[in-house]
Image (tube, helix red, strand yellow):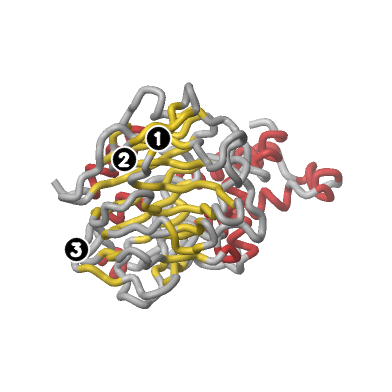
């Protein structure tokens, strides 16, 4: 592998995400906690060595001569292996045995940022597994616990108006943005409310024009990607991406979103997913790409808005609209939320649905 590629590797998205962990106090020299990847200490050690060898003083001085070419080659290969490993939490034997098999399926998918399984009692923070152990807290009245789950015996039961939030200063690598940014957001949902415009999860503040990405359910309209006009619809999945934070240029609101084809029912658990690869927004129902001509996929090559330090929070069950922080209220049960910093393949999503949904 050429040395310039190793230098570029120091600036890679995975390394930057990992560097955030170091800035937040999870140094690469420490053993991984239960919410961090099992290979984190190895990954950090290798990245730390490479980072040191990439420093200007090292490269321009005698250090570069002291590091043999074959050592650099081996390091690059080890780093490639480490980055390809699944993000599985470092658990002891007792904890590993307690993790639900469906949770294992999610945690085994590479480039997972955060996964919430909602097993905590009402009133307690919901702490994610994965790279970023973010703690969702109640935005108002406590979201109740239901004895009906997919990743264990429980799920979160949202009555309209109840919601969960992650403060912006704690958003970490869930702040996915940039021209080349990719994201996949999955929610395991059991519907109850029939209201329009239900916010499931994402980073989407319409009031302050800080939109980034969001999964919605049951919008009143869907956008024709050819005409850029909306038509009436009901009970569909909608994946919103914004590169500007505010309304779509030339429109009063954001109309740049994908919409599925098949109505989402109320009779059972469903896996709703949206993905963005930098070129198209896609919507999936129960692991299958739910194609709809002119609506899904939705072409969008403008990237994701950078909200900055005062950007939108990550919210579940509502989002900030028209000056109301818990607007677009969801009603029903959520068994899990997972966010990945890449587009998952169709095969990966099908496999997740098969591993997590009940027959």
Q: Residues within 10 Å of mark 2 (few under 14, many from 20)?
A: many
Q: For mark 2, what is the residue?
A: 236
Question: What percent of the width, then of the height, locates residue 162?
Answer: 37, 67
Calculate the distance from the C-alpha at mark 3 to the C-alpha at mark 2. 23 Å
Per the image, label 3 sits on a secondary structure element best described as: loop
Per the image, label 1 sits on a secondary structure element best described as: strand
Quadrant in which the N terminus appears: top right
Residue 212 drawn above or below residue 167: above
Q: Residue at x 51, y 67 (%)?
A: 31
Q: For mark 1, what is the residue?
A: 222
Q: Residue at x 19, y 63 (%)?
A: 148
Q: Residue at x 36, y 75 (%)?
A: 142
Question: What percent of the width, then of the height, locates residue 66?
Answer: 77, 46
On the rendered structure, is 76 left or right of 282? right
First reached walking from the N terminus: tag 3 or tag 2: 3
On the rendered structure, is 287 left or right of 18? left
Q: For mark 3, what is the residue?
A: 148
């Amino acid at each position: 592998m050429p040395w310039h590629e190793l230098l570029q590797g120091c600036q890679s998205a995975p390394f930057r995400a990992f560097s955030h962990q170091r800035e937040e106090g999870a140094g690469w020299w420490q053993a991984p906690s239960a919410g961090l990847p099992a290979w984190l200490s190895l990954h950090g050690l290798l990245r730390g060595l490479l980072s040191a060898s990439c420093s200007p003083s090292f490269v321009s001085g005698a250090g570069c001569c002291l590091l043999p070419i074959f050592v650099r080659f081996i390091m690059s290969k080890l780093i490639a292996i480490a980055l390809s490993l699944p993000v599985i939490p470092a658990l002891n034997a007792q904890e590993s045995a307690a993790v639900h098999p469906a949770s294992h399926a999610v945690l085994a998918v590479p480039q997972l940022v955060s996964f919430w399984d909602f097993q905590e009692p009402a009133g307690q923070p919901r702490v994610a597994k994965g790279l970023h152990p973010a703690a969702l807290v109640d935005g108002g009245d406590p979201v109740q616990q239901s004895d009906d789950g997919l990743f264990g015996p429980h799920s979160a039961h949202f009555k309209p108006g109840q919601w969960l939030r992650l403060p912006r200063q704690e958003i970490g690598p869930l702040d996915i943005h940039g021209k080349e940014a990719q994201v996949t957001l999955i929610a395991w949902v059991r519907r109850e409310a029939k209201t329009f415009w239900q916010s499931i999860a994402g980073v989407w503040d319409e009031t302050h024009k800080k939109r980034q990405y969001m999964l919605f359910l049951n919008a009143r309209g869907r956008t024709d990607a050819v005409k850029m006009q909306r038509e009436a619809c009901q009970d569909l999945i909608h994946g919103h991406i914004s590169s500007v934070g505010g309304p779509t240029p030339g429109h009063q609101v954001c109309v740049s979103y994908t919409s599925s084809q098949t109505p989402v029912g109320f009779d059972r658990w469903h896996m709703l997913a949206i993905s963005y690869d930098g070129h198209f927004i896609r919507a999936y129902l129960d692991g299958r790409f739910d194609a709809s001509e002119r609506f899904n996929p939705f072409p969008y090559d403008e990237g994701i808005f950078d909200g900055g330090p005062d950007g939108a929070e990550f919210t579940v069950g509502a989002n900030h609209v028209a000056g109301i922080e818990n607007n677009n209220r969801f009603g029903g049960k959520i068994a899990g939320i997972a966010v990945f910093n890449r587009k998952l393949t169709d095969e990966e999503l099908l496999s997740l649905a098969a591993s997590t949904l009940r027959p």
